Image (cartoon, rainbow, N blue to C red):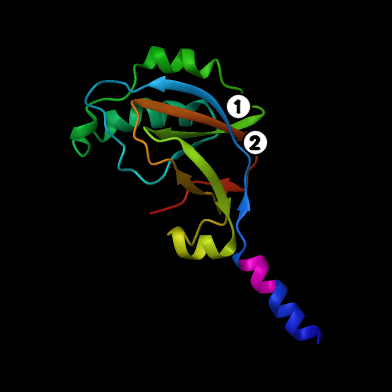
Amino acid sequence: MTIPIFFWGSGIWYNHPRKVAFELTLEIPKPNATFDRSDWLSYDYVRDNDELFFFMVEYYNKFSSVHKLYKAGYDTLFIENLSKQLDFKRYDYIITYQKQLKSLDHSPYLTKHQDGLYFDKRTPLIPSFDTIITNKVYIYQIKKNKKFRAPGP
């Protein structure tokens, strides 16, 4: 009797998605009219100021030949002022482009079936997005931790 209950409980633990609480912190306009990342199915997970600058400015400068549709990221001064509004000591941040985040879930099942970074032992947070495409970029906060990350390719 104990063995079937163990397997049943293990199956529920493996498959059942756990929710991670998040809160909308900022809503900012796209950096320019030609910027379009509405087809992207993930988000940027930001832990500190350096990562914020990378994802919002440097990423587009470094890879501009690959991402001609995006044209350019944000202005450095704009991101510098934006970073002063964020509390990196208490929170990590999730940046979504042109779609609002509905939920963040994780479970071993979701990790196995929706994540491609088998070598990274941190837990990927699998997003669900609203279907409406907007002209905004959304920044959400979650409690600071070292165990979560964005899902891989």
Label 2: which secondary element: loop
Q: Which residue is mark 2?
A: 144
Contact flag, marks 2 and 1 (Cβ < 8 Å): yes
Q: Nearer the viewer, residue 132 or 18?
A: 132
Residue range in magenta is: 10-14
Q: Quadrant of residue 146?
A: top right
Q: Is residue 75 left or right of residue 120?
A: left
Q: Amino acid at mark 1?
A: Phe
Q: Position of residue 89 (x, y in %)?
A: 65, 27
Q: Nearer the viewer, residue 141 or 102?
A: 102
Q: Which residue is mark 1?
A: 88
At a point 62% along the width and 31% down the height, the residue shown is: 91
In this orientation, does residue 67 appear? yes
- Residues under labels 2 and 1: Cα distance? 8 Å
Q: Position of residue 9 (x, y in %)?
A: 72, 72
At a point 62% along the width and 67% down the height, the residue shown is: 14
At a point 54% along the width and 49% down the height, the residue shown is: 125
**Outermost residue toward the bottom?**
1
